[in-house]
Image: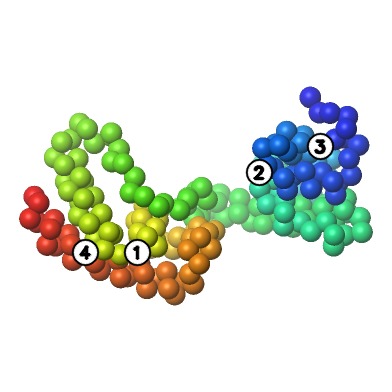
Amino acid sequence: MISELYIKESTKDLIQYLNWRTDPDYKEASQQAFIVICSRFREVLTKKCEVIAKRKGLSSTDAIEIAENTFKRLYKYSNKFDTDRHNDCDIGLKYYLFAIAQRECIKLYCKKNGIGVSPYTGDEEIITEFPKISDDYESNPVTRKQLEIEREVIQMALDRHSWKHQVIYLTYKFHKIENHKLPRKLLQELRDMLGLGQNTVNAYLKEITDTINDYLKIYGKQKK
């Protein structure tokens, strides 16, 4: 149930609560604020989504999905809305939501028509340590044994390089899909975490990949 306190809050203050969503002390406040914002802007946003969806040949059901995805993006990236830039935050947020909805409409249209659909989910995270081999391979001892050998050799090669090399290699190895670059969001997070530019990331990746390939040729055969 929504507290009367949050219903009376200004949109500017509600956005501030959203920006504190990662703080455990403000978790409930941010959730309440989000509910109020959705309630406050749902009608006008849904009408806008129906208009832009119709232009793309999408249905009213699609428009509702676009609106929901728009609110989800706001919740996740509320800090990108600068409340100080707007004299009237209600008007400012309305048009900010409209802009997000336009992008979400294009994404949904492309998805439905198979245009430039990314094979990534958007939930990919940086990998810093070698994941354990899944128990799914227990029924195939030969395959599992080979994976264990390969993992051991790769870890030997990783140990010859820096921790940054390891993080870059593992993140690429477990997320990279053939003929597709890693998601921009993941690459940015990787660069920020390691304090490296993309050219340096690429150079590190080549260095560690070359080393691992050499190790697999030498030690992989010896251990079989």
The amino acid pointed to by label 3 is Val
Residue 214 is marked as none
How far separated are the C-alphas under marks 1 and 2? 31 Å
The answer to whether marks 1 and 2 mark residues whose Cβ atoms lie closer than 8 Å is no
Q: Position of residue 166 (x, y in %)?
A: 35, 59
Which residue matches tag 2? 22
Seen in the image, is 65 located left or right of residue 38?
A: left
Nearer to the camera, 157 or 220: 157
Seen in the image, is 88 located left or right of residue 103?
A: right
- Categorize mark 1 by other alpha carbons within 10 Å: few (<14), some (14-19), many (20+): few
Question: Height in image: 27 above or below 49?
Answer: above
Which residue corresponds to the image point at 89% horizontal and 40% vertical from the top-left?
9
Which residue matches tag 4? 213
Element type where label 4 sits in the image: helix
Q: Position of residue 63 (x, y in %)?
A: 70, 44
How far separated are the C-alphas under marks 2 and 4? 41 Å
Question: Height in image: 15 above or below 102?
Answer: above
Element type where label 2 sits in the image: loop
Q: Which label lies toward us, 1 or 2?
A: 1
Which residue matches tag 1? 162
Q: Quarter of the image holding residue 22?
A: top right
The amino acid pointed to by label 4 is Asn
Nearer to the camera, 13 or 76: 13
Q: Which label lies toward us, 2 or 3?
A: 2
Which residue corresponds to the image point at 85% horizontal and 59% vertical from the top-left?
84
- Categorize mark 4 by other alpha carbons within 10 Å: few (<14), some (14-19), many (20+): some
Q: Give the position of the N terminus as an image quadrant.
A: top right
Color style of the picture: rainbow
How far separated are the C-alphas under marks 3 and 4? 55 Å
